[in-house]
Amino acid sequence: MKSVTVSIGVPQTPEQVYDFLDVMAHHERFTDHYLTDWPYSGPARGVGSCATVTATLAGTKTDVAIEVVEAEAPHRIVERNISAAGRRLAHGVYTIEPLRTGGSRVSFTYAWTRAPFADRLLAPVLRATMQRVNRTVMRRLATELARHVSAAGS
């Protein structure tokens, strides 16, 4: 299945964006419109930080195990996602790049490594759904970044 990428420009520096995204618990704040029930395990940040969430998409609920498997400050975070009793394996990759005008471009790519037969049959619908949901994620991320950096500065 083809991957899905969404991006947004934010006024925060790559270091500020990375510092926020590196903490697994912060992800709940901008994804809780479709990912709920966030028990955490492992370290709070960095490689090995984990969460098990319930994803609600297109009227179905699925438990998803998320683990950070790579981190390259302040440019990239890679998460491995396992769901559908191990039949679905995907990676979510956050890429953070400085903008020439200041701030950062944050991109998120969701790429399926393995998918159940039903997912492959519905690939165009799933990709469109993930694109829509992750655009919302990016807008909410921008809002939460602004709150986080503002709170840290005061």
Image (tube, grey):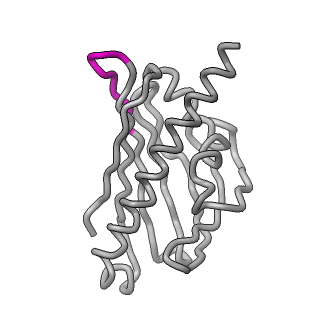
Give coordinates of residue 12: x percent, y percent. 47, 22
Which residue corresponds to the image point at 52% horizontal and 65% vertical from the top-left? 82
Give coordinates of residue 131: x percent, y percent. 36, 59
Residue 9 occupies quadrant:
top left
The magenta segment is 95-102
| Quadrant, the C terminus | top right
Which residue corresponds to the image point at 67% horizontal and 61% vertical from the top-left? 36
Magenta stretch contains residue 94: no
Which residue corresponds to the image point at 43% horizontal and 23% vertical from the top-left? 11
Vertical order, 5 against 54 (above or below): above
Residue 97 occupies quadrant:
top left
Give coordinates of residue 33: x percent, y percent. 60, 59
Vertical order, 91 against 87 (above or below): above
Numbered-mark total = 0
Give coordinates of residue 106: x percent, y percent. 39, 36
Residue extending farthest to the top is 154
Vertical order, 5 against 59 (above or below): above
| Quadrant, the N terminus | bottom left
Vertical order, 33 against 26 (above or below): below
- Frontmost residue, 121 versus 67: 121
